[in-house]
Image (cartoon, rainbow, N blue to C red):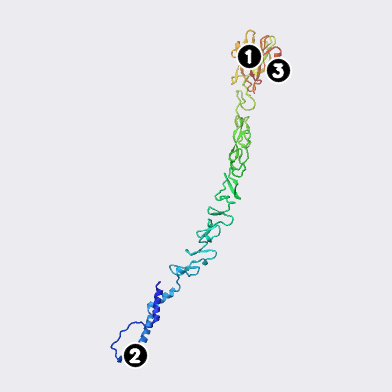
Amino acid sequence: MRWMPTFAALLLGCAGASTELDVPRPVDSSVDTSDAPLDATGDATGDATGDAARDADDAARPDAADVGSDVAADAGSCNPAADTCPPTKHCDGFTLKCADGCRADEGCPAPKRCDTAAHACVECVSDDHCPAGKKCVGKACIDGCDDKKPCPGTLTCCAGGCVDTKINVDHCGACASKCAIVNGTGTCMDGACKLWSCSAGFGDCDADGKSCEKSVTDDPAHCGACGAICTLADAVSSCVAGKCAIKSCAGGYGDCDKNPANGCEANLASPGNCGACGASPAETCNLKDDDCNSKCDDVAGCRTAVHRTYKASTGEHFYTVSAAEATGAGFVLEYSPYYHLYASAQPGLVPFYRCWVAGVSKHFYTTSSTCEGQTVESSLGWIATSATCGAIPLYRLVLDANGDHFYTTGADERSSAIASGYVDEGIAGYVWAGASG
């Protein structure tokens, strides 16, 4: 109790001023002389002995004991307002005793500081306790800077942190100057932003070191890498996922092995890949090479043979599809067969008529359905109007002297006939030398 020291001092001061209690005594006005000897001796004796007894009694009283105890206890107390505890301790405001926990920097191991509010040793209490480039945050020195706390050496304070603007990608050359590379990663060198690497699928194909401007996943001119050009055989090339691919094949070619590296390698006019990969169609009579063996209609039954005969007595040539008719009436077989016509109608073919000229009793052959005004006897077959499926010209000539019509597939024979007096009437049509192919 704070009043106990003062109270004890007052008691001790009074006790030290007198050996007896200063209590007023009543005056005996009727004292006679007979009492004098008693007073002279008795009072003196009584006072001497009585006061001493009272003093002893006072010393034994409980109040005096309590006061003595408080005085003894107050010898170990402290005052928080004027803390005189050792530096490693502090005056506890509740117990008024020195307790563990620093009260000053001297109570902490260097270089720690005393947080006098928490009485704990910490790294710092204020910014000036931290080295350059660091600030006191949460009683610890962490990286940081500001106008009052600059950075050490050549470092620059950017966004509250010390950076080297010569190499920092977020502050390259100056604060907030971020080194950003399009489709890539940059690096800061001597304060200048440079290309470090390109993101997957992109390349710096113009080599300017500033960006990765080209996609190398879908550009046929830069497929997989800058300058890697897709040039696939007989194909229009494309680039898919960084690899050359076939966008389309040139006409007549196919990618039958499904290997883009060799392009459209298959000729679709070849056996086994006839018209399409893996196709082997059957040959039919249609003026086409259906099975791609370079032979047109090379199957039996497509064409009819025409025989050429000659009758010397009249100087007449005769053409027929009947072998029996070819050698009758004095005619001698010259060529059997001489050429071939189609046995049935096909696109691009017309009938080849056998006609009779009554005035000269001779035959001739024409594509005219009216036999050019003469008598239509029959049709030998179907003749082509152009050189299709391997057809060759059939030349038509006439000898006015006897009305003989002469037909030949040979250019030399035609010339000889003209030299002998025949007149050239042009090409009657186109015929086939063989029965197939």
Look at discs 1 and 3 and give the one toward the viewer: 3
Camera-nearest residue between 9 and 395: 9
Q: Position of residue 351 (x, y in %)?
A: 60, 17
Check disc 3 and give the amino acid type.
Answer: Asp
The quarter of the image holding the N terminus is bottom left
How packed mark 3 is, by other alpha carbons closer than 10 Å (few <14, some 14-19, many 20 or more), is few
Say if 334 sits above or below 125 in the image.
above
Residue at image mark 1: 365
Q: Position of residue 329 (x, y in %)?
A: 66, 10
218 displayed left or right of 312: left
Q: CA distance from mark 2 to mark 3?
A: 201 Å
Check disc 2 and give the amino acid type.
Answer: Ala
Please tell me whether mark 2 sits on a helix, a strand or a loop.
Answer: helix
414 displayed left or right of 213: right
Check disc 1 and give the amino acid type.
Answer: Tyr
Q: Which mark is residue 412?
A: 3
Say if 368 sits above or below 120 in the image.
above
Camera-nearest residue between 89 and 311: 89
How packed mark 1 is, by other alpha carbons closer than 10 Å (few <14, some 14-19, many 20 or more), is many
Please tell me whether mark 1 sits on a helix, a strand or a loop.
Answer: strand
Residue at image mark 2: 40
Q: Position of residue 207 (x, y in %)?
A: 62, 43
233 displayed left or right of 142: right
Please tell me whether mark 3 sits on a helix, a strand or a loop.
Answer: helix
Quarter residue 94 falls in: bottom left
